[in-house]
């Protein structure tokens, strides 16, 4: 395993509290994250579960909240049922959202660790930009209060 990692930034013209809400409110997440239902108490050690349907297949992906500073940072482990790997620790990736606000503009840096190869890294980066690009439009469009 190559164990690559990535960090990809997205700038949102909105305060960090609105971006954080968009990242953690299940009703909002469902609107920009391919209709995915996310369940979590957003507390360290707590589970995080994503479920839904993709290409006619139902899925349930899961992980654990590893670190959290509400409003600015969260890091969680992540295993995808669609990834074709066994549900065991070495097949989990770590994903983080890091928010920094300056003058009412928030920079969200999405981090991902334990990526298997360059192709997967490129795919992930494109996915994150697409997903959070939609979230950015929603937040900047006033759909998140």
Image (cartoon, grey):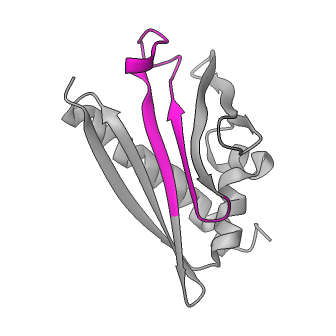
Residue 116: quarter of image:
top left
Residue 115 as seen in the image, left or right of residue 136: left
**Image height check: is 121 above or below 31?**
above
Residue 7: quarter of image:
bottom left
Residue under the image location 62 percent in, 17 percent down? 56
Image coordinates for residue 25, horizontal then vertical, percent: 76, 51
Residue 85 as seen in the image, left or right of residue 98: left
Task: Decide which of 81, 123 is in the foreground and name it.
Answer: 81
Residue 53 as seen in the image, left or right of residue 124: right
Residue interval drawn in magenta: 70-98
Residue 53 is a magenta residue: no
Residue 81 is a magenta residue: yes
Task: Decide which of 124, 53 is in the foreground and name it.
Answer: 124
Residue under the image location 29 percent in, 33 percent down? 120
Image coordinates for residue 70, horizontal then vertical, percent: 68, 59
Tally the numbered discs: 0
**Image height check: is 35 above or below 74?**
above
Pick out the residue farthest to the bottom.
103
Residue 137 as seen in the image, left or right of residue 8: right
Residue under the image location 74 percent in, 38 percent down? 40
Image coordinates for residue 68, horizontal then vertical, percent: 61, 52
Which quarter of the rendering shows the C terminus? bottom right
Residue under the image location 44 percent in, 25 percent down? 92
Task: Decide which of 83, 67 is in the foreground and name it.
Answer: 67
**Image height check: is 41 above or below 101?**
above
**Image height check: is 3 above or below 53?**
below
Image coordinates for residue 91, horizontal then vertical, percent: 40, 19
Task: Decide which of 76, 20 is in the foreground and name it.
Answer: 76
Pick out the residue farthest to the top.
86
Which quarter of the rendering shows the N terminus? top left
């Amino acid at each position: 395993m190559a164990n690559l990692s990535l960090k990809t930034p997205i700038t949102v013209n909105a305060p960090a509290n609105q971006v954080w809400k968009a990242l953690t409110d299940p009703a909002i997440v469902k609107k920009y994250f391919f209709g995915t239902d996310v369940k979590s108490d957003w507390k360290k050690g707590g589970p995080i579960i994503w479920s839904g349907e993709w290409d006619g297949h139902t899925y349930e992906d899961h992980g654990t909240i590893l670190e959290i500073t509400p409003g600015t940072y969260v890091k969680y482990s992540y295993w995808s049922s669609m990834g074709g790997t066994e549900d065991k620790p070495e097949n989990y990736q770590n994903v983080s959202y890091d928010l920094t606000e300056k003058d009412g503009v928030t920079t969200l840096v999405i981090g991902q660790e334990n990526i298997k190869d360059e192709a997967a890294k490129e795919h992930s980066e494109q996915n994150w930009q697409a997903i959070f690009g939609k979230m950015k439009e929603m937040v900047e469009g006033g759909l998140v209060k």
